[in-house]
Structures are given as structure tokens and as C-alpha cells.
Image (cartoon, rainbow, N blue to C red):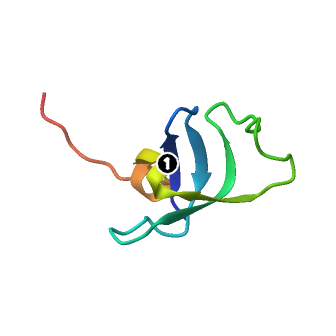
Amino acid sequence: MPTVLIHIANEDPVVGEIETLPGPTDMLITVKHPRRKDGKDIHYLDANVNTVIWPLSRITFIEVMPGVEEEEIISFVRE
């Protein structure tokens, strides 16, 4: 399940996990375990909420965070 950083219009970014990345025809995004970047609760959600569905029209962009598999990849970089 990829971890993403979602930038919502006129709100602070939200971190959460999603099943799959939204496609070009999707209108909604379902986010599990939504939280702020610092790990704190989101002030406009109840404390016991663990899944949120947002319309993609409110999302400005989504950053996909590297997973454990991607962090373990060793690559060589020429300087």
C-alpha cells in the first residue's frame, strides 16, 4: 500500500496510505490512516476516523513517498 502526501486546496498536506494510485477517470481518492506530516491528527476529522474519501477536484497534486523496497535499492551515481 503506497504512502502518499496529498496536497488539498487551501489545507495543510495530508499523509496516508492508498490501495492504488488514482487513474485518469477516477473522481475520488480513498485514504487510510490520514494524518498531518508531523503525524498529528487532522483537526477537522474525528479522532476515530481511519478512512477518508476526498473528491479529486479538491486535490492539487499527490506525492508518492518511497516505500521500503525502493529505499533498499542501491544505485551508483556519477559525480
- Left or right: 73 as drawn, with respect to 79: right
Image coordinates for residue 76, horizontal then vertical, percent: 21, 43
**Looking at this rendering, what residue extends furthest in the front direction?**
57
Image coordinates for residue 77, horizontal then vertical, percent: 18, 37
Image quarter of residue 14: top right
**Looking at this rendering, what residue extends furthest in the left direction?**
78
Q: Is residue 63 above or below residue 52?
A: above
Image coordinates for residue 36, horizontal then vertical, percent: 65, 36
Viewer-nearest residue: 49 or 17:
49
Check disc 1 and report the residue beneath it: 58
- Left or right: 10 as drawn, with respect to 24: right
User: Quick one: SS at disc 1?
Assistant: helix
Please report the residue visible at 70 percent of the width from the left and 36 percent of the height from the top: 39
Image coordinates for residue 12, horizontal then vertical, percent: 58, 32
**Looking at this rendering, what residue extends furthest in the top direction?**
79
Please report the residue visible at 57 percent of the width from the left and 33 percent of the height from the top: 11
Query: Which image quarter holds the N terminus?
Result: bottom right
Viewer-nearest residue: 41 or 73:
41
Please report the residue visible at 55 percent of the width from the left and 36 percent of the height from the top: 13
What amino acid is at disc 1?
A: Arg
Q: How many marks?
A: 1
Image quarter of residue 19: bottom right
Instruction: Judge the density around disc 1: few (<14), some (14-19), many (≥20) Cα neighbours within 10 Å.
Output: few
Q: Is residue 61 above or below residue 25?
A: above
Please report the residue visible at 12 percent of the width from the left and 34 percent of the height from the top: 78
Query: Which image quarter holds the C terminus?
Result: top left
Viewer-nearest residue: 73 or 48:
48
